[in-house]
Image (spheres, rainbow, N blue to C red):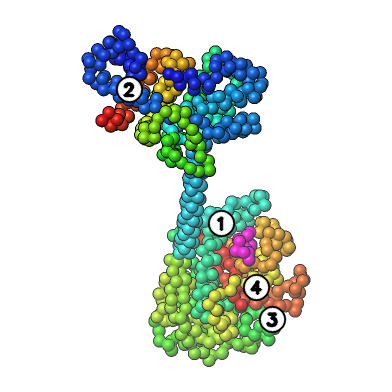
Amino acid sequence: MSRERFDELLDDWAEGRLAGSDAREFEALLLSNPNWRGEAECHRSFLQLVRTAPRPTAPPRLMSEAMRRARSGEEIPNPYEMHQKVIDIQQTIEAKRRKQSGTSRRWIYGLAAALLVTAGGYTAFQMTMDARDATPSATESPAAESPGGEAMPAGRGRMIADARKVHSDEELVTLESTASQTEIEERNGFERSFFSHTTRDDSANRKSVILAQLLNEEIGPAPAREARPVAAQPSATGAAAATDPLLMPDSAPKELARAESPASADDLSKVMSAFAPPSPSRMKRGAPPAAKPAEPTREEVAYYDPSEGTISHGDVWRVKDGPTAPAPEFAASARDELPAVSGTLDEKSPAPAAPASAPAAPAIPERDLIFLMEQGQQAGGFISAMKTATGETKAPLGPHVSEQRHARFINLPRDGARELTLVFADRKSLQAFLTRVRTLPLPAAGDQTGSTPADYLDVTRYTTLVSQDERTGYITLAIRPLLP
Amino acid sequence: MSNKATYGSGGLSRDEERVLVERAQAGDEQALEELLAAHQDLVYRTALRFTAGCEEPAFELAQEVLISAFRHIKKFRAQSRLSTWLYRITANLAKNRYVVVNRERARFTSLDNPSSGENDVRPREWRDAGVGPRQQAEGNEAMEILHERLGRLEPEWREVIVLRYFEDLSYEEISEVLDVPLGTVKSRINRARRMLRELMEDVMEEGHA
């Protein structure tokens, strides 16, 4: 209470207006508390300072400036508001900068993630392709329904469906292995010709078969092409009869077996003489082939093992203008371990070595394509698939399509396929097809019915790959043109 | 306090002020301008106290007060002196500028520190011419310190000090200007006085010595 009284009387005391009982009361308060006296003295000094302080007058232009602004409606910028606006602008700019920085960072992170995903996906793809190259694996079989949506017929349709499944199962591996071997052979200057067969064993439930040998044992040599001009195809028939495993004489497997065992160079020469191609003139006369054997030469080749996905290198003994046989020291192991069997049908000189960078696979001429399809069908087989120029695999519409000469090209490329795959129910049908394509003349260009004088299929331009499904027994024959 | 009659009313008697207010509210701009011109020193001086002696913001604040009075003269109800109404406007606008003034006061020239320049708004004349040069010099230094310490107070405490001791308003007038109860005015003044004394303690001790 006394403090309130002190504060109430302080101003009047400091300004000298306090008198009477209030003055005495205040003096008593000051005596009661020494701090209050000091406080009162300080306040009186403050008031004296304030009272003696100069009293500034307004600048002359204040009134005129204020009236001008008041009449013009001009707003006086409030420094506080301006200050707040500046702060807001600064915060906005900072927030925008942070946002842009964050956006840029997100873009960078996203791009990096995309690159990582792309790189990972590409690596996975490469690994998958490598694994596919190395280890054959079954792929999804197509539905047992024609691409046009109609159901397959019971007998032949089932065979086609199963064969397509077989072909689909083996397609990738088969084509890739063919390509690999082709490249290897080209690199090594390996002589190849029509139907240099390769068989494979791609899984546990499939057994590789050396069709060439089996077919040769069963069918024997193909008939000679009587109508084929010798001058145009000077070596086709005779060389085929001597070197094509499918057309080997009955004694050939035995000779081959002997050749595969370790033997001296003389023994090998004897063996190779059995494969020596007969001269065309002798073939025409039906006389035995010339007895003079050619000198074998040793060449290095590579064997592709599709079951292992590996490439083995070895030597072969090549007889000039003649067949090729494995080197004695390599043949036995190659025979046991590698299902690849290569032979040549053409007696011509070996093909020149391919350049380091192999060109793209050539297309099958349309005329040859039609001929191969027709003969395959006539032999009891059917068209399974076709590899287009772009690498895409297509299948014909169905078995009924192959009945119509032109309709089978409905979904096939007109510019020629890179590979034609035919499926045969058995080895007999395959051999019939091989015989037909070697002996029957090609239809004349533009003639849909076929005519004479015949022009024969240049079998030296093609190579094949044969595989058999142990379960169904169907034989798949992939025909592929050789590099020019 | 003779100052109160002179500066608090802008040099106008109550009747003169009432007439001018009526004419101004009727749309007479000349009467309005005359009325505001009579109070411009009061407005500027109060603004100067509120801005802790900083001339530039005091000039802007004073302009804002005059412009606001010019535009809203019709809202003045004439139940109190016009000076009270102007004090209220000044105090309200000064609060908005408190943050800025506090931030910028360091770069402004003191009220009593002479400056020269194109936009010099330093007071040109001193009403209280009765002090000698030495006293004025000492007083200027003390006033500079006082303004500096006064600027340290929050607006709530500063405005009651300014109105009570610099403008010599009574508790009732302060209560009317600030629109707060009388008891609140008394308690604010007492508390603000203690705070200011603590801030000015070193200066007062030197003065006593």
Mark 2 and mark 1: Cα distance apart in space: 115 Å
Q: Are marks 3 and 2 in contact (CB under 8 Å)?
A: no
Q: Quadrant of the N terminus of chain A?
A: top left
Residues beneath discs 1 and 4 located on the same chain: yes
Q: Earlier in the sequence, mark 1 or mark 4?
A: 1
Residues beneath discs 4 and 3 located on the same chain: yes
Q: Earlier in the sequence, mark 4 or mark 3?
A: 3
Please name the residue that numbered disc 2 is placed on: A44
Asked whether the viewer can see residue B112, the reply is yes
Chain hosting mark 2: A
Q: Nearer the viewer, mark 2 or mark 1?
A: 2
Q: Decide whether residue A381 is among the magenta residues.
A: yes
Residue closest to the far bottom: A292
The vertical placement of A292 against A146, above or below, is below
Residue type beneath disc 3? Arg
Q: Secondary structure at mark 1?
A: helix
Residues beneath discs 2 and 4 located on the same chain: yes
Q: Residue at x 27, y 28 (%)?
A: B208
Q: Earlier in the sequence, mark 3 or mark 2?
A: 2
The vertical placement of A47 against B142, above or below, is above
Chain hosting mark 4: A
Please name the residue that numbered disc 3 is placed on: A228
The vertical placement of A4 against A38, above or below, is above
Residue type beneath disc 2? Arg
Q: Are marks 2 and 4 in contact (CB under 8 Å)?
A: no
